Amino acid sequence: MKRNRRPDGKEKVTGALKYLTDLSFPNMLYGKIARSPFPHARILSISTEKARQLPGVQAIVTHEDIPGLNGFGIVTPDQPVLCKDIVRYVGDAVAAVAADSIDIAKRAIELIDVQYEPLPVLDSTEKALDPSAPFLHPDGNVLHRAGFQKGDIEEAFSKCRAVIEETYHVPRQLHAYMETEGGVIVPEKNGTLTVYVGTQHGFKDRFQLARILGMPESDIRIVSSPMGGSFGGKDELNIQPYGALLALATGRPVKIHQTRQESMRSSIKRHPMAITMKTGVDEAGKLIAHQTVIVADTGAYSTLGPAILDFAVEHAAGPYIIPAVHTQGISVFTNNGVSGEFRGFGGNQITFALEGQIDRLAAAIGMDGLEIRRLNLRREQDAGPLGQRIAETNGALDVFESAAALYREKKSASLQERPWKKIGTGMAVTMHGGGLGFGRMDPAGGRLTLKGNGKIEISFGFEEAGQGILAVIETITTEQLGCAKEDLSIVIGDTAVVPSSGSTTASRGTSMVWHSLQRLKKPFIAQLLKRASLLTGKERLSLGEGGIWSDGEFLLSYKDLACGQAEIVAETEFDFPVSPDPIDSAHFLYTYSGVVVQVEADLLTGKIKVTDLHQTVSAGPMVNEMGFVGQIEGGGVMALGYTLLEDVVMKDSQYVTENLDTYLIPGIMDVPFQLSVEPIEALPEQDHFGPRGVGEIGTVAVAPAIASAIYDALGLQVNQLPVHPETVLKSIEERGVFHGGQSSNSGAS
Amino acid sequence: MDVSMPVQTVVWRPGTLEEARSLKREYNEEARFIAGGTLMQMQREQGIPFPPYLISLEKMRELSDIEETVDGAVRIGALTDLETCRTHPLLKKRCPALQEAIGTISSPAVRNRGTIGGNILYGVGDVIPILLAMNARLSWFSEDGIRSESLSDYVTDSVMPLSGAILTDVTIPSQSEAHCFFRKIGRRETFIASVVTVAMQAMVSDQGFIQSIRLVAGGGVNTPRRLVKCEEWLSGKRLSDVQLTELSVMIKEESALIGDAFASAEYRRTVAAHLLVAELQSLQ
């Protein structure tokens, strides 16, 4: 079936592909950015005099050199491009240098003399919310509050048979894309600027850069694909403003490519959150009351902090139908780096807490974890978590039943435990909204063109970040038009030539490519066939491999159809589908996953090894099996890292983990040998929304499934990620959970 | 602040030990020896610049062989790369636990460049615990000729025998019937620094008596050390009589491992004790 090879696959695995950070131009300079060593300080003075004396330095820019707005941020531009008075985290930029070589630029950065007066450091949300805390922004330290309420929560709690209250702590996760931020910014002869830097939304970068540079958007061209990974991390601007300012200052191309250390210091991370949940069930095991308080550490600047909190609030009750729900969230400014967009978008944090609650409640009332889920999961026609109507699917129960069957099978298989090991099986289930949500501008679009050379050009404003959008475009377009992949030319990632498609985020790419083709194919095919009919005088024509066919016979090549005539163009613009109910930020298209995990706990060291990771995913028809499996398996491994290894540790708002030698992502030996994905493609007959995107869903419910397996193995209920072996070992020692017989005479017990 | 670029490092590539020694004598504090360079590259990444002069030992091929000596010991040239050690037939036959330990070091790329001598001189390298357990000796080329000392003395005193000395080889005495054990615990499965390393070499008689034993614990920034008190306490005892709980407490105390931001001292000591005790128990 649909095991199409990626069009960009061979070049990527052989290393032949040139990324934007591999580009070089004649006369090119190298840029470096000077960032604050203090997490919070007042700038007393900036002297660039010495640095300018260094031979080979071509330009130095500070806040004084910004022609337009000294700020960026996808929604609220409150992050200074170059700080003037105050620095609010250790990645804050104060100056940038362009020089003849990287070494000279590096040395020049050391020679820039910035005098700071350190200010009190708000290194926790508690400190930032203290009434005596200094304000990090004019309106204080609260970036955003969000909430949701239905039913009478107090009354509902009074009727509960059992109530569980727990606070869950989740870490700051690094995207750890292979290609760190970078590219080349080229000033063109006609006064325009070409920015060869990866991003998830070229038109948004163009808008933000125009505002900073005081230039018309039409004078800026963004070339932004391919990228060596992003995962949400390159949606916001990163090095582009510095490269642009330096290119304009010198009139020469400027390349900036951050080192891993520079990247870890300045990049956004996944929001750390403290989530307190109080959840109750009635006599029958029905969930009747669910109260949640979310405190998110959003760091120094806004970026997408508000939307991420909204998303977490929306998913607080996830796929469960609970009559009384009360959710409150607060996103707090601190001096801890900047938190922002990351695959899963607040869903991963909240799902770890929610599924933890379900497992604890099941244990508390002596009910099977599967039974309590089956009893409370949403049905096809139930409203969405904010009470909004959503696209109906039976996804929640479908993935649950698939996962439940596998869970029972794994649980009952008599596995031979090795000495000093304990095996545990766990499961979790979730739902995840795609698109940006109600009330947010979420336009999409695409364009089909029969070019003069006979190629059918399909173009989108989407970006290829390794997720496989090129394969998705190729598969959907050839399927919908009937042509061969050799007939196609795919154009993305260049604002000079592509239509606006919105951002390549929020699991929207695949879905929007399919919707575009639904709109484009009819007018496009009609125009092609009309011309073919005129040229040949034949009827009953169709598009096929290589050209136009009639009654199973090849008639006319696309080249002959295009030759000497005007291009045939079909273009579409539309919005991502939303709920008919006007509830702010509510989603309409959801995907679902059921996860089954097996772990092996080491009783001597407390280490947890995931030995089996299965995900059943309901996201409509699968476009390309290899792409689908890649997204879910890759997402699963990323989530495994989140659960067991990954934590950007900060102390006094300084990074403790400065590079990938202390910040650990999983290696191949941490990945379970048993890794499986089951797609559920079924949709109700009336559904006309097609394939949903699966960029995020594979990351969402893995952590709670691993936690559930740890509980099964050891009786330990973890409430903090990543799960430290130390916590596990302490619990093992306290409980005396040891392998039968072996511990009787052991000093290890 | 001086407005100029940092000095470029000059690399010397002497062909003989004498030449290397005289270069070191000449440039003294401004020069460092370099072999595979994997550690120094990592340190440079962490902000420790290269010195003005590097004396590369790479051309001294005679220091990169592995052979059996006349008295049945195994001699490994200090410049032998780790991958060669990991796959060498003689070591496979005589020191499989050493090969296992080397297999846990970093990544294949690093093992292809890094040398066994470099790993020892790192001070906390993962070959040290098992070499200590096997009672290895080091040979040095120094101002006053070839000198030899036990690895244990070297790590305990942690002083280089005279400035400018060059480690030439590591010798592992013959002890064919001994039971060897090595285990490294890191924060992930591979390509990772150690949190805890333990090693053991034990000779147990047919009657179940411990004839000789060496126990080693290290990990992280902790220099691997022999647990001499524990060894003495165990020697001569019948395995089945050993009070494992008491031994566990002794190992924790004597190992004296210290912690960092990622793993506490208590955790490291507990894990070291668990691993050694479990291994000893498995010999019963």
Image: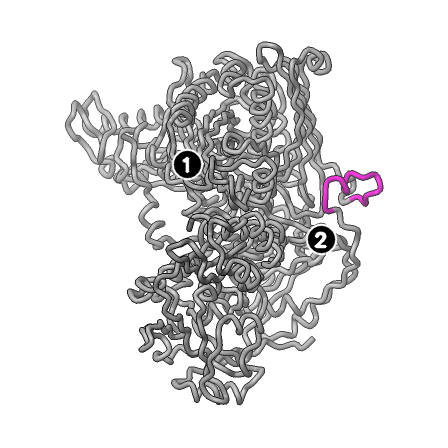
Up/down of A719 relative to A165, above or below: below
Q: Are marks 1 and 2 in contact (CB under 8 Å)?
A: no
Which residues are the magenta region?
A: A123-135
The type of colouring in the image is: one colour
Q: Are marks 1 and 2 on the same chain?
A: yes
The structure residue drawn at horizontal position 34% and vertical position 80%, both measured from the top left corner, is B62
Seen from the viewer's position, the closer of residues A240 and B84 is B84
Which residue is depicted at the point 57% across and 31% down?
Answer: A352
Q: How many marks?
A: 2
From where the camera sits, is residue A157 visible? yes
The amino acid type, in three-letter code, at marker 1 is Glu
Residue hosting label 1: A417
Residue A134 within the magenta-colored segment of the rendering? yes
The quadrant where residue A630 appears: top left
In the image, what residue type sits under mark 2?
Pro
Say which quarter of the image contains residue A721.
top right
Disc 2: which residue: A39
Query: Which chain is home to disc 1?
Result: A
Main SS, magenta residues: loop
